[in-house]
Amino acid sequence: MNMNLLLLCLNALLFCCCSSSRTNFVLLFADDLGFGDLGCYGHPSSVTPNLDRLAAGGLRFTDFYCTSPVCSPSRASLLTGRYQTRSGIYPGVLYPSSIGGLPLNETTIAEVLKPLGYATAAIGKWHLGVGADGEFLPTRQGFDQYLGIPYSHDMGPCWNLTCFPPDVKCVGLCDIGTVTVPLMHNEIIKQQPVNFLDLERAYRDFATDFISTSAKKKQPFFLYYPSHHTHYPQYAGPGAAGRTSRGKFGDALLEFDNTIGNILTTLEKMGVLNNTLIFFTSDNGPELMRMSRGGNAGLLKCGKGTTYEGGMREPAIAFWPGTIRPGVTHEIASTLDILPTIASLAGACLPQVVLDGVDMTEMLVHQGKSKRGTMMFYPTDPSEKYGMFALRLGKYKAHFYTRGATHSGTTPDQDCPVFALLKAHDPPLVFDLEADPSENYPLSPEERPDLQALLERIKKVKEQFEAFMVFGESQISKGEDPNLEPCCNPQCSPRPSCCRC
Ligand SMILES: *[C@@H]1O[C@H](CO)[C@@H](O)[C@H](O)[C@H]1NC(C)=O
Ligand SMILES: *[C@@H]1O[C@H](CO)[C@@H](O)[C@H](O)[C@H]1NC(C)=O
Ligand SMILES: *[C@@H]1O[C@H](CO)[C@@H](O)[C@H](O)[C@H]1NC(C)=O
């Protein structure tokens, strides 16, 4: 760290410790929720009064991207402001018995805020590793407190568990052969298997307590709530089950929305709503293979697992009454930009590493332009050999490779399912996303005499970016050790049935 930077940070620390109106942050992250799943993005039958309130009173993004079409890598980027290729969260996702996890020397948003005296808590789906003795849990990455299932809630036998009242069993094939999913408080298993019908109530109470306690102490806070909703298998407790016309997916979404409503009410009651930035988005596109229970990408092509727009363009809303003016923005932005924005608003130092995110403050607070001109699309299994699959430059998107995915099966579009094998495009397929957001009509040299010049610009941006992309050691390739599966009764047998508490 050079001297100037050090002084800057000291200033920031002094300023923050003495300022009475430090900004709080609430980061809401939906799971497998697609671009077309909310009413404010065009869905006709979703019921989300609280998200609607955020959208009406906040800034809604039309061109917001996550960094990966699957869970773990997307979350790694959100929390570090870096593409998952750098932190090694690839290929695919982490499992309950994974040996690796988000490396502890990566700096998360929580760790950026801790030196300024923030209280930090995470609720819900972590999915960045558990490891031996919980070495990769949120409590090791800057969060004071954690309550949740540390990975996807389908990563354990679920066919005997209840997902809807009074006793409607969870549907379908969850990943079998592993222990049932645990509910962890900090690093301790509180309940196994988790009671899905009571889970939102537990989260709601935890969030209420965290916000109230912090506000009473006048301590600024960061609440990260990556929800399990609306990932498969959907579940909902008595407050949401059967209350929408959209079926199980709609009920799960309503339950998440209810929790958001409770957070809003608590912020209001504690008098800190105007001093809190709430940011909402989703980890990746809809899991189309689940058909009507898998979410919806709206007018975007394909979904989860693919580098088409449906896999990675997400609904996003920034809400901060009195500071962010209500409206809609078409600027390009990304989950990568959340860490630098929070750091800037809090007056915190940026981690001294290569960051891929840009500060959105100007754009949020002063209707400014995004500092982001590009977005890179990596597949679920990124490699130095293939590099990025696609690149967005301004309104253009170039695909160097396309491929379908298991997660995106079942729609009529033949480019989406796993049967659409890897295809290289040279020259790349280029789409004008403003004229053709559905990626239906690649530009041709006949209609676009300037295509060659555009291709050259794209090629240059790609080369410049990839020259400085250093892949971190793959954490997921470290493999699995069955002994690492969280079991509340570690020495018991036979597993998994004995892991019950
Ligand atoms: C973390 O440590 C690993 C292994 O020493 C190193 O390769 C990596 O660059 C480090 N990452 C950061 C962000 O410092
Ligand atoms: C599921 O329930 C059935 C019927 O109650 C029971 O026979 C079976 O052992 C249960 N399976 C597990 C894994 O608990
Ligand atoms: C919060 O901001 C809104 C909009 O600017 C204003 O109407 C309201 O009075 C403020 N509330 C508090 C508690 O300051």
Image: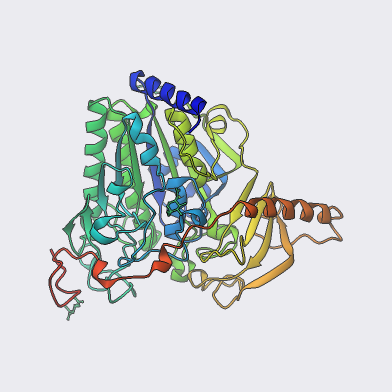
Residue 433 seen by the camera: no
Answer with left or right where residue 134 lies relative to residue 474: left
Residue 257 percent coordinates (x, y): 36, 47
Residue 99 percent coordinates (x, y): 33, 65
Location of residue 398 (image quadrant): bottom right
Q: In this view, does 138 lie above or below 70?
A: above
Location of residue 54 (image quadrant): top left
Structure colour scheme: rainbow
What residue lies at 60% left-to-right and 53% top-to-bottom?
376
State how many labels appear. Answer: 0
What residue lies at 58% left-to-right and 72% top-to-bottom?
412
Residue 29 seen by the camera: yes
Q: Which of 166 and 390 is in front in this view?
A: 390
Answer with left or right where residue 141 lies relative to residue 70: left
Q: In this view, does 375 lie above or below 399?
A: above
Q: In which quarter of the image is the C terminus?
A: bottom left
What residue lies at 46% left-to-right and 40% top-to-bottom?
339
Answer with left or right where residue 300 lies relative to residue 449: left
Q: Nearer the viewer, residue 19 or 332?
A: 19
Q: Is residue 77 above or below residue 487?
A: above
Residue 498 percent coordinates (x, y): 14, 72
Q: In this view, does 319 lie above or below 108?
A: above
Residue 145 percent coordinates (x, y): 25, 44
What residue lies at 48% left-to-right and 31% top-to-bottom?
344
Q: Which of 87 and 210 is in front in this view?
A: 87
